[in-house]
Image (spheres, rainbow, N blue to C red):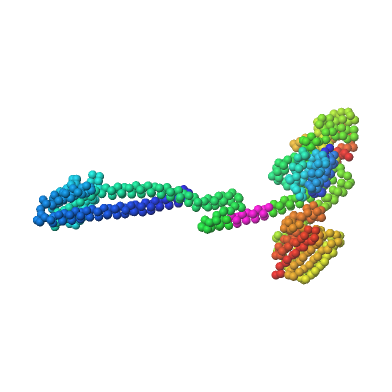
Amino acid sequence: MARILIIEDEHALNDLIAMSVKMTGHEVIQMFNSSELSEVLLNNKIDLAILDVMLPGKSGFEIVTDITKYEIPVIFLTAKDNVADKVHGLNLGAEDYITKPFETIELLARINVVLRRRNKNTKIFILENLKVYLDERKVTLNDKIVELTIKEFDILELFINNKNIALSREHVIKSIWGYDFMGETRSVDVHIQKIRKKLLLENHLKTVYKFGYRLEVH
Amino acid sequence: MRFWHKTYLCILIIFLIAFDTGAYLLMQKAYDINEKSNTKSGISEFLAVSQITKISLSTYENHSDKDVLPLLKSIAENYRQQDIYMEFYEDNTMLFSNFLEFSDDRKELKSDNISTVYRTINNKFYLFTSGKLENNRYTLVIIRNSDFLIKYYNELLQYFIIISIIISIILSVLLVLALLKLTRPFHKLNLVANEIADGNYNMFVEINSNDEIGEFAKTFNKMANAIAHHVDELKLSNEQKERFSNNLTHELKTPIATIKGYSELLCKANVTEEEKIKAYNYIYEHSLRLQNLTQKLMDLIYLQKETISIQEISVNYLFDEIIKLLDKNLKSKNINIEINISEDTILGDEILIQSLLINLVENAIKASHNGAKIVLCSRKPAIIEITDFGVGIPENEIKKITEEFYRVDKSRSRESGGIGLGLSICKQIMDLHGGNMNITSSVDKFTTIKLVFTTI
């Protein structure tokens, strides 16, 4: 679990990011302008910042170094979609860059990549009697090791990284097997069945009708 | 070859020709004068000798050659001390000579009057003066050494050459300095022109002379100024366009991102009931915002193409309509409208003027505090004023306020549903009517928007 700072002046987008991020188990701090940034940075231990470029008052480009000097990785969020701006943002020390309109899954994936790179990602996922050690790729149920195949573990990890969010079968295939996988989406169902059975996740790894699956955690 | 090289060579050549010719002629003249005075001395010596001879001869009666010859010899002996020699002839037969023997055409002997000839003999220069004595029987020739003339001439020539060389050197140096100074403005102009060619448009030349170059520099500066001005204008309009497209992108992408994001969330995520309501509200709010934005953009595009139909509109009627249309907004903030009418009609397109006033009164309501008043008044000639006593506009923002997407307070205006196009639409409407929109304001006191219509 990481603490994520969101700086975005549009309330709607700020809330949207906050909801999605919270859903995957992270904690958020929401800011709508940069006026109290230094106090927030001093008083909280922050693992990642999502920063809008077009802010009232000082722009995101102007305040990014105030954040990166605390060794906090920054993901820029902006409507500007040109290469020069991207390069400018990355040169200023940002970890990544995402343009509006963005997909929630994409944003979450990028957050995960950055957190993993900074080694700030969740290392153990605990759900009732289930423990998933993500670094060691080990799963225990009631403290007994459960053997999963490589693909089964990859799928489980994908759902852990996108807690409470429905992932389509196509998305799972794309993420696990890659773009050029020619097989049936049925193989996703087969793997999900096996995971449910092995880990007793029937009540959590739910089917979303006509779409895919969702790992529900509250 | 550079311009100053050419000028330098031309001036140097012309000067040297003129100077050398003048100096040479002067030298010749000086030599001539000296030669003439030497010839005169020769003639006076001849006259003196002939006088002495004549007087001496006259002492003898019936004198013969024998008497003359010794006398002449003694005179010649005297003169010889002074490097002057004599020859004596009787009917072209030489009687006496103390000069060297030489052969030449002795044309002076043939003349009946006194005549002079210069000859060079054995590298020495002599003046021969000859004339007749005693009834033309005798001819006397006085030979005078005139080497000093040649020496004088050579000295002059040497002096002339040295002077010519020295003057050429001094002239060259001065010319180079003068030409470099004179052509420096061209160099400067060239540098500045190059700078301008490289894109530094805010350059000018500092040349303050009153000559042709100064004039040219002035014209050049005028040109550079005009270029800089045009480039600045282009830049400004480009910047404005870029700002417009950036703002438009932002205004379009934000609601789209919101709607897309929340619908995705509702579709895929396991959201709570509370979050669901929040999401629905955001989606609704932002689709309204998009609708509003498209409407306003259409208005702007429509206004840019439209020719308007102008008619007389009753101000009273206009104000009444606006109050009716905005009744809800006014009541919600408990705002009173005060009306003063002293101009009864204005000329304009009714629909456009109405939407203009609605926009402005809406702004006034947004700026006002609860329970405040708004003053609508019409004054002669063809002026409508809208005054509110709300938050006001900072002075430095007034100029930018009619630019598309410009907002004084970004977050507050967005929360109250503004998209920053209202005032630019108002300005366009006034432009279409050939009128003016003037804004005066004081922060936390008042804002007055004065619409000046044309009367014709």
Task: Determine the main secondary structure of the stretch shown in magenta.
Answer: helix
For the point 76% across and 60% down, which residue is it?
B441
Residue lying farthest front?
A: B59
The magenta segment is B223-239
User: Residue B348: image x %, image y %?
Assistant: 74, 67
Indicate yes or no whether the magenta region holds residue B225.
yes
User: Residue B162: image x %, image y %?
Assistant: 37, 47
Does residue B52 appear to the left or right of B32 in the view shown? left
For the point 83% across and 41% down, which residue is it?
A43
Does residue B59 appear to the left or right of B179 in the view shown? left
Which quadrant is the C terminus of chain B positioned in? bottom right
The one of A153 and B125 positioned closer to us in this rendering: B125
The one of B294 and B122 positioned closer to us in this rendering: B122
Q: Is residue B147 visible?
A: yes
Q: Is residue B288 visible?
A: no
For the point 71% across and 67% down, which residue is it?
B454
The one of B45 and B264 positioned closer to us in this rendering: B45
For the point 13% across and 55% down, which residue is it?
B57
Does residue B60 appear to the left or right of A99 in the view shown? left
The one of B226 and B430 positioned closer to us in this rendering: B226
User: Residue B376: image x %, image y %?
Assistant: 80, 66
